[in-house]
Image (spheres, coloured by chain):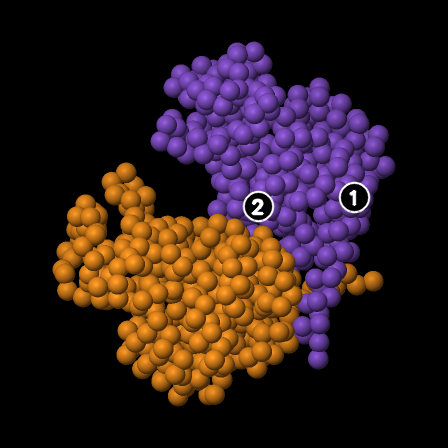
Chain colours: A purple, B orange
């Protein structure tokens, strides 16, 4: 296939694969797509190790890194990262802490301790994401993506100085235009059916709107609900230059997804997700479990703004992950989870996408044959 | 274009146009698509007149009728239509009536009177929809569609005896399979972005799921978010045999949409809709206005089950329509409303869909050229 993004990056297929797992990133890039490592959960030191590993295993193919620099969050004016974290920590209400403790106790998960709190917050703010960008730009990455709103203009400049293209996720046309204004090269237009942070407009409606809004110059990737070749063909028919996928890599062979979570994902239907603020304080699509239900229940104290919600729950999520009880465990995942029923190598997922894409296009062509 | 549905109905384009307006239905059928008249708001006598008019103006082209026979509703066991209506009327809590009256008063809309209550309920139940089916089958209709769940099996048999094909709207794969079991010929797989009653799975995810679930024998139309040729191409790429559209016909020249409502639709963006129970008691996508907001507010008494919610509000909706204040006025409409920015003749909308469809397909073909 040849589109503007395959030409730009010298890749074989316009398939971008977001994953927190370095093995998946390297496997997709080697298979002809483009792996993009989610840096969110790594300290700068950890990220350095991950990227070094990818450099050694990606066979010289291009790959990207995804950071989270939200345009708006609480505490943006509270000083440097350490200071901000400690101040925000103090602002978390006891009522919310009690709600989380009670919920875990109800499900037999051991109570929260203070140890390690805030660690998982690392990538959720501008202040904490910048060191990740510094690390990333020291590696031969081809793409720097920002997951929430337009990246700061100076980060775009810095990336461009390193010859790195910048992508930004947008869930509506207005945000997409803002990203173009700060110099973003590629818009990832992400529909509400996507996993993780997501807006309310569906991929079907969003892609043509964004394509028309950003104009000829800017490339657009379609995201949200794309896990099969027919969906890739639909995304391209809507006007995109390529597709951005995430959820489907959670259940591939190479993924480091915990066994319990993987089993839940394989079993889930497309109706088993919910858009919830219970993960980070901003709406994100998650696997619907007693965790997401509890935050919607009458007992719920309501969620806190980003980044405090994740600070509140990060320990709890780790403890739930470690506990024998998989019931509470949730996961950012899109509605495509209903089609994730089989564990396959990442490369096979790439080839299956392309095979079904070609079949879909052949069928379309027969419909208009004379 | 040639697909299984164009062959089946002898139509030129696999474009189905749902509308409550006979002029739109006739215009789309004459332009080579298939108009489908929503019978919901008509008494059997009124429906007879509408269909007679269409017969005289459709130029011998095929058209369809859409009724609402919900699989589940309150009062299904309360006797015949008149008896049921009067019993249900008595079950509407005073608190809910007061909430509606207060809301109207707040916006300067004159208070509710008792006159005419329940009239607009006509098509919302099996008991009230059957007389509509009787009327419809006396006309040369090509298609009978049911909007909520599988139609009763005997209605399917009756339609088939008249040589009429039956379509059923489904918002998930399990419901689609149920419809096939009762003999439905065509599944309208409708994503969450659609206007009116709608499920939670997006069109992008839903269509391949339904196509795979119902098997080779059953035709599938893609619905939800489809208003432009690129979206039609996407729907077909997802595996559909045609597309089902609704919202886009609200703003065509021929539509009898009240001026105030039309203006609001032309101005709205794709983010200005909301899935709400405030219209019928079942989740339906509506234009977001102070009406839908009020039912979500703290003062809201909560919505009533179908069909009582619509019985409660039908007079209010008429009064809002007549009043000078367009602020409360809402309308079932999908997220595609963001692309409805221009008033055009219905036939032009059909031709524009096809033109952009062909462009989209040509672009797809250049991407895989050797």
CB-based contact (under 8 Å), mark 2 and mark 1: no
Is residue A67 something one can see in this rendering?
Answer: no
Residue A126 at x, y percent in the picture: 57, 27
Q: At 60% across and 57% down in the image, what residue appears?
A: B213
User: Tag 2, which chain?
Assistant: A
Residue A203 at x, y percent in the picture: 56, 52
Against A44, is A57 above or below? Answer: below
Residue A156 circle label: none
Label 2 to label 1: alpha-carbon separation: 24 Å
Q: Are marks 2 and 1 on the same chain?
A: yes
Residue B136 at x, y percent in the picture: 38, 78
Quadrant in which the N terminus of chain B is drawn: bottom right
Task: Tell me if B71 is positioned left or right of B310 in this view.
Answer: right
Against B136, is B195 above or below? Answer: above
Q: At 36% across and 85% down in the image, what residue appears?
A: B52
| Dot 2: element | loop
Task: Tell me if B351 is positioned left or right of A38 in this view.
Answer: left
Task: Tell me if B369 is positioned left or right of A203 in this view.
Answer: right
Q: Nearer the viewer, residue B366 or B51?
A: B51
Is residue A268 something one can see in this rendering?
Answer: yes
Residue A347 circle label: 1
Q: Which residue is mark 2?
A: A269
Residue A28 at x, y percent in the picture: 77, 41
Q: Nearer the viewer, residue A168 or B335?
A: B335
| Dot 1: element | helix
Q: Nearer the viewer, residue B197 or A259?
A: A259
Q: At 56% across and 25% down in the image, what residue appears?
A: A325
Sequence-first tag of 2 and 1: 2
Give the class, few, some or many, for how many residues have Cα within 10 Å of label 1's Cα (few <14, many ≥20): many
Task: Tell me if A100 is positioned left or right of A45 in this view.
Answer: left
């Amino acid at each position: 296939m040849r589109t503007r993004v395959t030409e730009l990056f010298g890749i074989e297929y316009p398939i971008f694969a977001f994953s927190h797992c370095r093995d998946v990133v390297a496997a997709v890039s080697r298979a002809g797509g483009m792996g993009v490592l989610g840096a969110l959960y790594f300290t700068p030191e950890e990220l350095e190790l991950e990227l070094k590993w990818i450099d050694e295993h990606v066979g010289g193919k291009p790959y990207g890194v995804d950071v989270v620099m939200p345009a708006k969050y609480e505490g943006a004016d509270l000083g440097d990262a350490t200071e901000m974290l400690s101040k925000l920590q103090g602002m978390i209400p006891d009522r919310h802490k009690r709600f989380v403790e009670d919920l875990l106790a109800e499900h037999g998960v051991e109570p929260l301790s203070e140890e390690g709190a805030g660690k998982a917050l690392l990538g959720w703010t501008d202040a904490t994401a910048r060191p990740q960008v510094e690390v990333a730009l020291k590696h031969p990455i081809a793409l720097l993506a920002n997951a929430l709103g337009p990246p700061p203009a100076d980060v775009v400049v810095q990336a461009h100085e390193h010859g790195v293209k910048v992508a930004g996720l947008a869930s509506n046309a207005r945000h997409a235009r803002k990203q173009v204004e700060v110099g973003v090269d590629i818009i990832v237009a992400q529909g509400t059916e996507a996993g993780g942070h997501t807006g309310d407009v569906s991929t079907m409606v969003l892609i043509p709107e964004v394509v028309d809004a950003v104009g000829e110059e800017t490339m657009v990737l379609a995201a949200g609900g794309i896990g099969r070749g027919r969906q890739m063909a639909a995304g391209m028919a809507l006007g995109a230059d390529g597709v951005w996928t995430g959820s489907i890599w959670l259940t591939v062979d190479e993924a480091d997804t915990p066994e319990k979570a993987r089993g839940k994902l394989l079993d889930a239907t497309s109706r088993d997700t919910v858009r919830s603020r219970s993960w980070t304080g901003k709406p994100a699509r998650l696997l619907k479990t007693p965790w997401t239900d509890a935050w919607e229940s009458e007992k719920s104290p309501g969620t806190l703004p980003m980044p405090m919600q994740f600070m509140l729950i990060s320990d709890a999520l780790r403890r739930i992950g470690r506990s024998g009880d998989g019931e509470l465990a949730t996961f950012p995942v899109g509605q495509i989870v209903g089609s994730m029923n089989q564990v396959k190598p990442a490369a096979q997922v790439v080839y299956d996408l392309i095979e079904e894409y070609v079949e879909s296009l052949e069928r379309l062509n027969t419909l208009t044959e004379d």
